Image: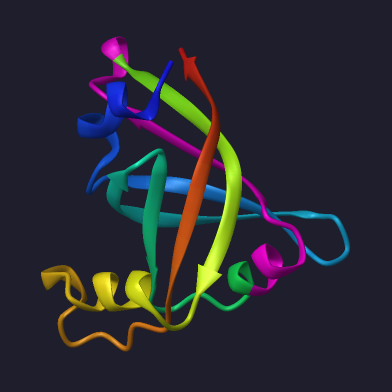
Amino acid sequence: MKIEEIKDNIKNKIADLASVTLDNKPHTIAVEVNEVKDNKIIITDNQMKNTPKDIKNNPNVSLVFWEGKKDEERGWRINGKAEYYDSGKYLDFVKSLKENKGCLTKGAIVIKVEEIKELG
């Protein structure tokens, strides 16, 4: 499965982003997916504390999201390698989004998709 096949399902949706801490423990937060383009997922950092450090130490991440009503739910797990940007074109892009207007946008997380698995 390719990310383009589920692009409309995940864009602007809330998903769980799991990273790995410095002491090899899982760390999961809720994020909004801002863009899906060129086999990459772009996410804004407005309030993250640990996730940027985790990604700089270990780029392996997993993103999980669900959609649909309870009896018709389906979901996806997307594994990939993330990079954190606190300057440059990705930061400029997330700062330009209307949903970030008035926010202190600190950075952008860009996940290069490596594997997608349909759940449920």
In the image, residue 103 lies at what x, y percent? 25, 85
Q: Does residue 17 sit above or below 44 in this rendering?
A: above
**Does the magenta run of residues contain 105?**
no
Q: Which region is colored magenta?
A: 53-72
Q: Indicate the quadrant where residue 65 lies.
A: top left
Residue 35 shown left or right of residue 88 in the figure:
left
Q: Indicate the quadrant where residue 31 lies.
A: bottom left
Viewer-proximal residue among 81 and 119: 81
**Does the magenta run of residues contain 65?**
yes
Residue 105 shown left or right of residue 76 in the figure:
left
Q: Indicate the quadrant where residue 13 lies.
A: top left
Q: Does residue 1 sit above or below 7 in this rendering?
A: above
For the image, the number of numbered tags is 0
**Which residue is at a point 24% across and 22% down the rendered structure image?**
68
**Which residue is at a point 40% across and 22% down the rendered structure image?**
2
Q: Residue furthest left?
A: 98
**Which residue is at a point 44% across and 25% down the rendered structure image?**
76
Viewer-proximal residue among 87 and 49: 87
**Which residue is at a point 57% across and 55% down the rendered structure image?**
82
Q: Does residue 71 sit above or below 55 in this rendering?
A: above
In the image, residue 11 lies at what x, y percent? 24, 43
Q: Does residue 27 sit above or below 116 in this rendering?
A: below
In the image, residue 33 lies at what x, y percent? 32, 51
Residue 65 shown left or right of residue 11 in the figure:
right
Residue 99 shown left or right of residue 71 in the figure:
left
